[in-house]
Image (cartoon, grey):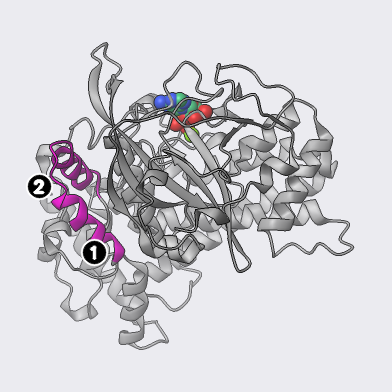
Amino acid sequence: MKLNLITQKFTQLFPGDFSENTMQRQTPDVMFCSVKPAEFDTTELIDFNEKLSEDIGLGKLENNEDFLAAQHLPENVKTYATAYAGHQFGNWAGQLGDGRAIYAGEIQNGNRQTEIQWKGAGATPYSRNADGRAVLRSSIREYLMSEAMFHLGVPTTRALSLAKTGEDVIRDIQYSGNPQKEQGAVVVRTAESFLRFGHFELLSARKQDDLLKQLADYTVENFFPEVSLENNPSKYIDWFQAICDRTLKMIIDWYRVGFVHGVMNTDNMSVLGLTIDYGPYSMMDGYDLEFTPNTTDLPGRRYAFGKQGQISHWNLATFANAIFPLIDNAEVLEKILDNFGKQFWVKHDQMLADKFGFDEVLKEDEKFFTEWQQMMQDLTLDYTLFFQQIEKPISEIKTDDFKDSFYRNLNENELKKLLNFIEKYHTRKLRNKISESDSLDLMSKTNPKFILRNYLLFEAIQDAENGNYEMFFKLKKALENPYENLYPEFNKKRPSKYDNQTGSSQLSCSS
Ligand code: AMP
Ligand code: MG
C-alpha cells in the first residue's frame, strides 16, 4: 500500500483545531479537529477490496493491515474529523459532525482524487456522548451494501476494508433498556469527497459567508467538472443545478433497484450526489410505497420508499437556503427547485419504461405506470421478482409464475387484476419500435437479478458474529454480479419467518 502518498489538502486549506482534544464540544471557529484514532489490541482483518485499492492509487495490501484498523499510522497521515450540521427528521439539529468517522486524508491517482475514512475508529469532538465505535453488524451492512450499490450502477461511497477491533461495544438495538455486548469493527470507506449538505448548512448558520464561499469554490473546482469556472457569473447557480441533477440521478437509481435509505436527514446527503451513510436502509421486498425499515421513522414514515423523491426535493430546498448568501436570488433557486420536481417525474417514467423494456415513453404510459403502481401496492408483489417474471418473450409470461413473488395468498379478484395487467402490458409492448430481443436486453441491464435483501444480510451477520464468514463472502460474490443470476438460492422473496424480525425487517439507528 502506498500510504506515503496520502495527503491532507482539506486541512491545509480550511481553519482547524489541531489540539487533538477529543472532548465533545461545539467548535464554532473551525471546520475540523485533529483527532487520533483509538488504540485496539487485537485487530483482525476480515476483508480487503484490493481492486478498489489499486483503482484509487493505494495499491496492494503488503503487510499494512494495521492501517485498515487505523493503528500505528505513518507520520504523513494526520487524522481529523470535520464539523457539519443538518436537519434531522425535518428539524434543525445544529452542529453534528463526524462522530465516528475519522479522515486519513486524500490520495491522488492521475487526476482522480479520493478521500479515505475509517468509520468506527474512535471518538471525536463530534461524538455527542457516544463512543465513536461501530459494531460488526452495522459495519457488515455498510461494507456489503455500499459495494452492492456500486455494482448496481448507483452513485455511492465505497468500502475498502472491514476489520474487527477486538473490542466489545455496548449497544441497545431496540432502545428497550436492554443493552448487549457486540463485537466492534472498523470499515475503511472512500469517496471522491464526503462533503454533505450539512457542511454548508453549518457555515451558513454560523454566518461565516467567507468560509461558505471558500468551501463552495473548493467543491466546484475539485468535484464539479460540469460547472464552467472561467468567467462564469452564474457559477454557483450552475453548481446548484448540478447538485440537483446528480441528486436526481441518485434517487431515480434508488427507485430503479428498490433501495430505501431510511434516514435522509440533510447531514446524510452528499453534495456530490452519492449514496452515503448506510444505516437502517433496506432493499424493498414486497412493493409498498409506505415502507420504511427504520423503526425511528415508523410513526411519520417521512423517509418511506415512496417519499424519497419529495424528501430529496425538501433537502435540496434546505441546501438552497444554506447557500443563498452566494447567490442572493431566490427566484432563480426556486425555478431550479420547481424544475427538479418536474424532472423527477420525467426521469421516473423513463426509468420505468426501461424496466418494462419500452423504447420510449408514450403519452399513455403515465396511466399505464400509475395502474401498475396501484396493482403492485394492492397486491404487495415482490418488486425485484416481478420484473424478472416479465423479462421474457411476451407470449411466455404466465400469471402462475408470479406465485413466487406473492407475500400472501391472492384471491380470485386479485389474480384477475394481475392477469389484466399482463394483457395490457402485452398490448403496450406491441407498440415498441425496437425488436423483442433489444427490449429484453434493455430490461436485463436495468432490472437486477440479485439484490442484497435485509434477511440475507441478517443471516450473514448472525454467522459472522459466530466467526463464520462463508455467507458473507458468498453475498460479496453475488453483489459483484447483480445483473446475473449466479446464486438462484438468493434470488427469492423474503421467507415469512423474517416478516417482523428485528435486524431484518425492522432496523434502528443503533449501530
Ligand atoms: P446518523 O444518524 O448515523 O447519521 O448520525 C448522526 C450523528 O451522530 C453524526 O454526527 C454521527 O457521526 C453521530 N453518531 C452516530 N453514532 C455514533 C456513535 N456510535 N459514536 C459517535 N457518534 C455517533
Ligand atoms: Mg450520518
**Between residues 481 and 251, which one lies in front from this camera angle?**
481
- Identify the residue position indicated by label 2 in the image: 409
Q: Which amino acid does label 1 sit on?
A: Asn
Q: Quadrant of the C terminus?
A: top left
* Majority SS type along the magenta span: helix
The residue shown at (52%, 52%) is: 191
Please state the horizontal and vertical placement of residue 149, each as a whole percent of the image. Answer: 38, 56
Q: Nearer the viewer, mark 1 or mark 2?
A: 2
- Identify the residue position indicated by label 1 in the image: 420
Residue 322 to residue 188: above or below: above
Helix, strand or loop status at disc 2? loop
**Between residues 192 and 66, which one lies in front from this camera angle?**
66
Magenta residues (range): 453-480
Please state the horizontal and vertical placement of residue 310, each as a whole percent of the image. Answer: 53, 43
- Residue 383 appears in which quarter of the rendering? bottom left
Please tell me whether residue 454 belongs to the stretch shown in magenta.
yes
The residue shown at (15%, 43%) is: 459
Q: Quadrant of the N terminus?
A: bottom left
Q: In this view, does 228 lie to the left or right of 256?
A: right
Q: In this view, does 433 lie to the left or right of 22?
A: left
Helix, strand or loop status at disc 1? helix
Q: Earlier in the sequence, mark 1 or mark 2?
A: 2
Please state the horizontal and vertical placement of residue 346, each as a whole percent of the image. Answer: 55, 62
Number of numbered labels in the structure image? 2
Residue 197 to residue 83: above or below: below
The residue shown at (19%, 64%) is: 419
Q: Which amino acid does label 2 sit on?
A: Asn
Residue 500 visible within the image: yes
